[in-house]
Image: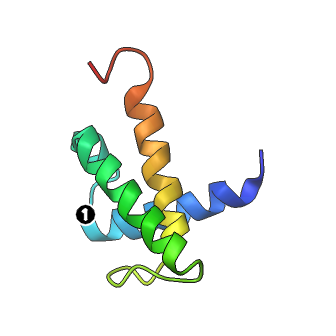
Amino acid sequence: MPWQIVRDIAQIRTYGNRKYHDPDSWRRVELDRYIDALLRHVIAFAEDPAGKDAESGIEHYKHAACNLAFIAELMKGDNHG
């Protein structure tokens, strides 16, 4: 596995932890919201590969990677039910 994706997701998680003050808050978000966010960031990345999210100042592809990681975790087993 390329280690850079771990670093990228960690950067987004650090930002999220500072913003929400709860490292587990992502677990209480509906799957649909992560799917919407993933698509939003992928589209923004496709339009401008160097583009950054206006709020966080972090690249869209890093947000997309984190959203996909959250989706993967929520989809494991029968959690998406």
Amino acid at dot 1: Tyr
Q: Is residue 28 above or below residue 10?
A: above
In the rendering, at what x and y percent does residue 65 appear? 53, 55
Left or right for 51, reference 54: right
Occupied quadrant, residue 15: bottom left
The chosen color scheme is: rainbow
In the rendering, at what x and y percent does residue 62 appear? 54, 65
Mark 1 = which residue?
Answer: 20
Per the image, label 1 sits on a secondary structure element best described as helix
Task: Name the residue: 64% across, 54% down.
Answer: 6
In the rendering, at what x and y percent does residue 33 appear? 25, 49
In the rendering, at what x and y percent does residue 53 appear? 40, 79
| Image quadrant occupied by the C terminus | top left
| Image quadrant occupied by the N terminus | top right
Occupied quadrant, residue 3: bottom right
Q: Residue furthest front?
A: 47
* 4 vs 71, nearest the viewer: 71
Task: Name the residue: 35% across, 84% down.
Answer: 54
Q: How many marks?
A: 1
